[in-house]
Amino acid sequence: MALSIDLTGRVAVVTGGTRGVGAGISTALLAAGAQVVTCARRPPDRPLEADGRTALFRQLDLRDPEAVTAFFRRVRREHGRLDILVNNAGGTPYRLLADSSPQQAARVVELNLVAPLTASLAAYEVMAAQPSGGSIIMIGSVSATRPSPGTAAYGAAKAGLDSLARSMAVEWAPKIRVNTLTLGMVHTELTSLHYGDESGVAAVGRTVPLGRLATPSEAGEACAFLASDLSSYVSGAALLLHGGGERPAFLAAAHPAPNPPTH
């Protein structure tokens, strides 16, 4: 039996879906047949297209609850439905906690935890009223599961996001499925800001068991799977997209000598 991801006729919203990982997600959903509406504070540098179709863009500050509610009602009014929400918008600058103000830390939590909650509540209003329900996908991070020096507030927010997704999956079942796509390192247009030039990126990639960083399109393909009927019994789950994770640090510190020959 051939299996394929077909999202034809479905309407998807991708927050922060104009650049980087978000653009990869938007493009993958388009390629699977969905109508895609992206929202962000800034428009994309270029139209996002796949198979001759283009994602729509709506300007939105996700930290404004009234604007978020109005946006999702507009999606329902213009498209008649909402089947998929990908809470992708987020991020953080590198800043040690001791160098951060409480206001700076609060803004990171607001963008990475409160904004997805606000968007999900507005999406629920639409999805719960339609017979087919819907699928909500949180874009998480491995920063939620390990120490994240320099991005501590971000890691804490992403840990909260994963917990939020699991609770939503219970409260909103069976009509709405809620899952988390937990990302490791992804090679985007901003990668050089974190890891330097291509040699630095390659060096970082060698720390990953699969030997490289993920691509935005791979994140998009995983989202398309979670949004599709192929994952119809998947809810409250976290799918790890991290290339095998990180090698334990002690493996680099300990280099036992090989056994001497016995002959």
Image (cartoon, helix red, strand yellow):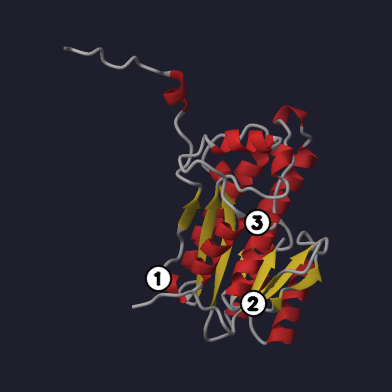
- The answer to whether residue 30 is above or below residue 263 is below
Q: Which mark is residue 233?
A: 1
Q: Amino acid at mark 1?
A: Tyr
Hey, which quadrant is residue 262 in on the image? top left
Q: Amino acid at mark 3?
A: Val
**Residue found at x 57% / y 42%:** 143
Could you tell me which secondary element the residue under label 1 belongs to? loop
Marker count (numbered): 3
Q: Which mark is residue 21?
A: 3
Separation (CA) of disc 2 from disc 1? 29 Å
Q: Earlier in the sequence, mark 3 or mark 1?
A: 3
Hey, which quadrant is residue 2 in on the image? bottom left
Q: Which mark is residue 141?
A: none
- The answer to whether residue 149 is above or below residue 88 is above
- The answer to whether residue 123 is above or below residue 201 is below
Residue 45's spot in the image, x, y percent?
81, 61
Question: If the image is split into quadrants, where does the N terminus sit?
Answer: bottom left
208 left or right of 255 in image: right
Hey, which quadrant is residue 42 in on the image? bottom right
Q: Which residue is mark 2?
A: 51
Residue 55's spot in the image, x, y percent?
72, 73
Q: Amino acid at mark 2?
A: Asp
